[in-house]
Image (cartoon, rainbow, N blue to C red):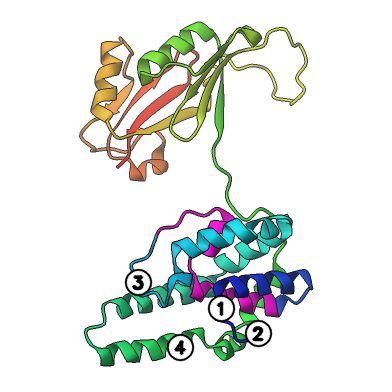
Amino acid sequence: MIARKDNPADLFNSALEAFAAGELEVAVACLRAAFFENLYIAPHLIGEDYFQQEIWYPGDDAGLGAASEYADRFGGLWKESRRTIRFLEYVWSDPLVRRELENFINLSRALLRAPDERARNELLDERLRYTDRGRIDATQAQILRRLRDLDHTSPTRPPALDSIYLAAANTEESVEFYRRLLNVEPRKTSRRARGCAEFELAGFRLVVHGHDQQSAEDPYRLGPRPQSLGWGAMLVLGVRELDRYFENAHRNGIEILDSDLEGAKTGAHGSAGKSVERFFLVKDPSGYLVEIAERR
């Protein structure tokens, strides 16, 4: 059971205190009530992308400014412990919570567009039923069961691609190939390990490096080097200006192994190409296949 509070900051702080005291049921109930009072504090704290909803707001406490102010004042308390912020992530992403927040947002959107006072009052009554603490307390069981069954040591988000490292038979040739194919200059270069160049692409780094011939050991048990370094590997790069990249490849004398500029067939990566309509395929000097695919 949670005390009646309408201020989202008080509700978030009560949830934090209850979780620290081991009162899981109270902590979850406080968070669910807090989500209704401000939709932006939770995603702000956990680093999730969000945008301002075009809905009816009961006051300034429900807006983006209040979320930023709360994060500035109290965000450090939530982030002191990874366990605490992950608890917030779990509750925020719970299926029941996502469903009720989606319905609540639709209700608040209808409130903003209510044609008259009668319709507005009916929607306000429905909103009160949604935020009623008794309803929240009565619908806790599923969420609590899922929380208790969760492995709180497992990651809660999928990883982001940071870098791809490609071993090159001839580093200079490979670096020049990617310079011409992508029309991008390497951000960093190094002479170590028979040469290395780092290209900064959209969302990740492509690092081309020389095969280290000095090490006779195989510490990661990779086995013997294949005749073609590119065997079994393929790089798929999504672009918006496919025709320009295609013309650029032609202009730089890069052989086109396969292409579909009409969108009639699937890319070389098979079923993964469902979202790709047009592409062309090339091969770098080390034997890696590179598909340039149109993304819309």
* First along the sequence among labels 1 and 4: 1
Task: Judge by depth and name the residue closer to the eye, 101 or 174.
Answer: 101
Taking the image as shown, residue 132 lies to the left or right of residue 127, namely right
Q: Secondary structure at mark 3?
A: loop
Q: Earlier in the sequence, mark 2 or mark 3?
A: 2
Residue behind mark 2: 2
Q: Identify residue type, mark 4.
A: Leu
Identify the residue at image location x=41%, y=78%.
Answer: 58
Q: Quadrant of residue 279?
A: top left
Q: Could you tell whether 233 is left or right of 156 in the image?
A: left
Label 4 packing within 10 angstroms: few (<14), some (14-19), many (20+):
few
Callout 1 touching callout 4 (CB < 8 Å): no
Q: Is residue 168 left or right of residue 242?
A: right
Marking on residue 186: none
In contact (CB < 8 Å): disc 2 and disc 1: yes
Residue type at tag 2: Ile
In space, the residues marked 2 and 4 are separated at their CA atoms by 16 Å
| Bounds of the magenta segment | 26-51
**Quadrant in which residue 269 is drawn:** top left
The x and y percentages for residue 186 are 47, 17
Disc 2 to disc 3, C-alpha distance? 26 Å
Q: Which residue is mark 4?
A: 128
Q: Amino acid at mark 1?
A: Ala
Mark 1, secondary structure of its residue: helix
The overriding secondary structure of the stretch rendered in magenta is: helix
Q: Secondary structure at mark 4?
A: helix
- Please tell me whether residue 139 belongs to the stretch shown in magenta: no
Of callouts 4 and 3, the N-terminal one: 3
Q: CA distance from mark 3 to mark 1?
A: 18 Å
Q: CA distance from mark 1 to mark 4?
A: 11 Å
Q: Residue at x 42, y 25 (%)?
A: 290
